[in-house]
Image (tube, grey):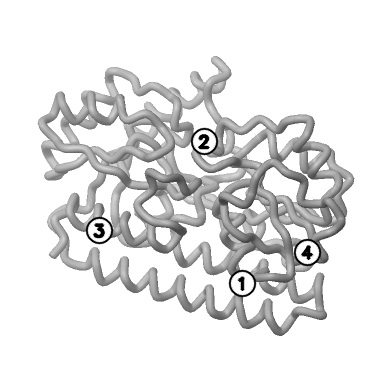
Amino acid sequence: MNVRRRHISAVALTAVAALGFGTLTACSSDSAAAGDTGTFDVVASFYPMAFLAERIGGDHVHVTSLTQPGQEPHDLEISAKQTAQLEESDAALYLKGLQPSVDDAIGQSPIATKIDAAELTALEEHGTEAGHGEEHGDEHAHEDEHADEDGHGHDHGHEGGDPHIWLDPVKYAEVAEGVGKAFQKADPDHAADYRKNTATLVKDLKALDQKFRTGLANRKTDVFVTTHAAFGYLAERYGLTEEAISGLDPDTEPSGARVKELQQIAKEDGVTTVFYETLVSDRTAKTLAGDTGLRTDVLDPVEGITDHSRGEDYFQVMEANLTALRTALGAR
């Protein structure tokens, strides 16, 4: 696999303010910077960033999420109200490369503290490789170029690497540690709490990593099929091969050649399931599954929590993902 790594920025580990998060339902479009919260006001770009803030910041901060529950983060366009809200806040926590609208708004904002989670771990290239030979990788590269020319593709998979780092518990823990250190520096009065909360979160993430390692240790196949190439880090961490119907952009329609290729892969590698996600239509997954005699199931990229999610927070949904993967891969 061709991997392009980006080193952690030392600046990013220090130029961060204290963050926190109550619940997703509490994170509405109401301004977090009303001045009467008595806490540090932070704008988080979407759920995985807000969840980090909740666990690390605790009661010391107030966070507003730019992406509402049920909204596909890739499609977010910042409103004028959100732009004003951002400018009134004390800090912003985001993941550069996932949401171009957010990147632009934060880049142009006078907000003093801008936290890019992508700077707290090494990004890699995923989503343009089929994993079954160079010709497949070339085919997807051409498809991605075509998508970009048509204005329907996302460039976040090319310029800065795959942004879906939170789906790897180990990488997510690296980000958590970086944010925790930054909290301690930005808000020394609460440094002890941030240090304790970070340590607890990292411990929980390491336990989740071990659950995946143990749960997927004995399996019949390494290959799983998804509609959206969001699980590259997870696949690499646990020795799996993700075959995505589309690329990093969940809305891209697959080519006829790609569908035929996936049908052959499913037959050769003992694939039983085509996974789709909660925030994107399951039409493509069901079409492919119907043509190949496979079943469908949910593999959630945890980009947002809704009433349809298989859990109420990151950990619960990730454990549901593990159960789904164990079934699909024939783990015992």
Going by the numbered disc 1, the residue's amino acid type is Glu
Could you say which disc has been placed on residue 17 in the image?
4
- Gap between marks 4 and 2, in whole Å? 26 Å
Residue 40 percent across, percent down from the top left: 80, 63
Q: Residue at x 51, y 35 (%)?
A: 72
Dot 3 or dot 1: first in sequence order is 1
Residue 143 percent across, percent down from the top left: 43, 23
**Residue ID for mark 1:** 177
In depth, the one of 239 and 201 nearer the eye is 201
- Gap between marks 3 and 2, in whole Å? 24 Å
Dot 1 or dot 4: first in sequence order is 4
The crowd level at tag 3 (other Cα within 10 Å; few <14, some 14-19, many 20+) is some
Q: Residue at x 82, y 80 (%)?
A: 189
Dot 4 or dot 2: first in sequence order is 4
- Gap between marks 1 and 4, in whole Å? 14 Å
Q: Quadrant of residue 287?
A: top left
- C-beta proximity under 8 Å, tags 3 and 4: no
**Residue ID for mark 2:** 72
Q: Residue at x 23, y 31 (%)?
A: 262
**Residue ID for mark 3:** 323
- Gap between marks 2 and 1, in whole Å? 27 Å
Going by the numbered disc 2, the residue's amino acid type is Glu
Going by the numbered disc 3, the residue's amino acid type is Thr
> Element under label 2?
loop
Q: Quadrant of the C terminus?
A: bottom left
